Image (spheres, rainbow, N blue to C red):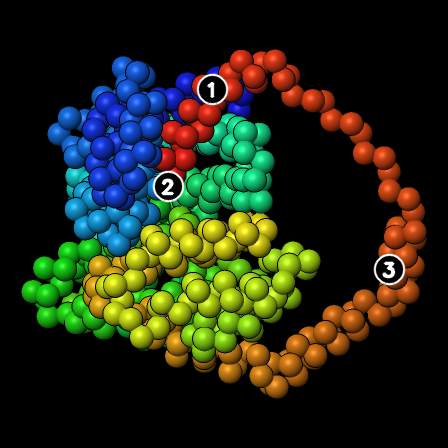
Amino acid sequence: MRGPHNLLRLVRTGATLERTGAMRVIMDAMDAPPLVRGTLRFLAWPFQWLGYKGDLSMPPAVRALTALGPAYIKFGQIFSTRPDIVGDDLAAELRILQDKLPPFSVDIAKKSVSQALSAPVETIFSEFSEPVAAASIAQVHKARLRESGADVAVKVLRPGIEKAFRKDIDAFYFAAKMIEILSPSSRRLRPRDVIAHFEGVVLGELDLRLEAASASEFDANTTDDPGFMLPAVNWDLSSRRVMTMQWAEGVSMGDNAALDAAGHDRAELGERVLQLFLSHALRDGYFHGDMHQGNLKVASTGEIIAYDFGIMGHIDEYTRRVYAEILYGFIQRDYKRVAEVHFEAGYVPADRDVDEFARALRAVGEPIFGMDATRISMGGLLSYLFEVTERFGMETRTELILLQRTMVVVEGVARSLNPQINIWQVAKPVVEDYIRKNLGPGAAVRDLRRTIAVLSRYGPRLPQIVENALIRQAMPEPEKPKGIRWKSVVWLALGTLIGAGATFILVSLV
């Protein structure tokens, strides 16, 4: 339920951050202004007794996020790839959240596998290891098939994970609703839609049959991509709570020392992982939505191995073209065209000034070019972009949330491999290739043929379709029922507490 009882969950978020010492660590890492630092700690301090103690053996930030639950761990995983925002020390600390969380026992895992596959583990596998990786939703065991002797990875959902995520999601919905009520200017960001999108992504991760299907589709799309491979799914040994795949041997992409020792070129790997992501997003419209270091390995042959396909992104062809044009415009420093694309796609209200928007975009893009990548403050850039979008009334595009988030994660991975990487220079050949193939005369002819084919199928029905549309347009709009007003007295009494809770949840998300 998404009622005010979730206020306790939000207050407990801030209290846990303070009790574990994570509040101070996060504020220091992000170089928060003294006023913000003092205010947040002042609000959290009286409630710290409500916070979770967590595992005392863990570093403060990891301790707080793991104590708060799987949804919070997800956000920590994202920032583990962004040392330019949270600093090298905190990013390295948060990397524990990718695949080194406390596991549940192997006996519980075997019981889950036996129930899911309707057979004792011993009859299927000749060997079944202790957990080799443990993340927020599931953990992985290395096993050997009794029949063939092949090594496989067996992924098993954590017990009770569905209930734990539901509790967090409900609290996030409540926080988003309170933010919209207390801060009308935030409604353009559509916080509830953002949470709904996050909920859909998470629920998809909780059914491993869907992950197996995603892996199969992704493999079909990327078979011919050089330097990239995926482990094969064993469908006979997969179900809703268990998934079995080919074992992939390699060095973790988060272990720079091991990559260097194996003789891999980290600069080339950083470029390749970024270009692969852009190719999948633009060419296929289907991309890995969780490409942090914990889900990437490098084989002895130099191939990048991706796994964990619980979060996959999909964008339609039109949106891909818009996205490519925006990227291409930035690369070409054609800010007027970037502004026009935003207006044509409806991303910016039509009553705003195109030239003024183009000037604002120039202020965002120009500092990037001709500058050493290490001197670019991504935190400052994102902050300025937020100011620009607020000034021009842009709404959050929920269909692009995962794409934007994954771009941030992949850039973080590439930067961790090569701090000198310039994302625009690396992206340029991929974007130019897409533009050439999909926005030129040949693409126009393909679109025309496709349009004619659709019209030919609907030809006999077109007159009736047009007539029905005109009739609907001519009919007066039904009077909208008057909504029930919020119980102002209740919210006024709880206003201060709700504001504090909303602040705490925003700190956790940002």
Say which amino acid is labelled 1. Answer: Thr
**Is label 3 in contact with label 1 (beta carbons under 8 Å)?**
no
The answer to whether 101 is drawn above or below residue 470 in the figure is above
Q: Position of residue 4 (x, y in %)?
A: 51, 19
Q: Which residue is mark 2?
A: 510
Q: Position of residue 299 (x, y in %)?
A: 20, 65
Residue 138 visible: no
The residue at the far bottom in this view is 441
Which label sits on residue 496? 1
Q: Position of residue 239 (x, y in %)?
A: 41, 42
Distance, label 2 to label 3, CA atoms, is: 47 Å
Which label sits on residue 9? none
For image coordinates 51% across by 16% down, the residue present is 494
The residue closer to the viewer here, 176 or 356, is: 356
Crowding at label 3, few (<14), some or many (≥20) Cα neighbours within 10 Å? few
Say which amino acid is labelled 3. Answer: Ile
**In the figure, is residue 305 to the left or right of 480?**
left
**Is label 1 in contact with label 2 (beta carbons under 8 Å)?**
no
For image coordinates 43% across by 63% down, the residue present is 364
Picture quadrant where residue 62 is located: top left
**Mark toward the start of the polypeptide (3 vs 1):** 3
The answer to whether 64 is drawn above or below residue 205 in the figure is above
Q: Secondary structure at mark 3?
A: helix
The residue closer to the viewer here, 113 or 500, is: 500
Distance, label 1 to label 2, CA atoms, is: 21 Å
**Mark toward the start of the polypeptide (2 vs 3):** 3
The residue closer to the viewer here, 231 or 118, is: 231
Q: Which residue is mark 3?
A: 465
Q: Secondary structure at mark 2?
A: loop
Q: Secondary structure at mark 1?
A: helix
Crowding at label 2, few (<14), some or many (≥20) Cα neighbours within 10 Å? few
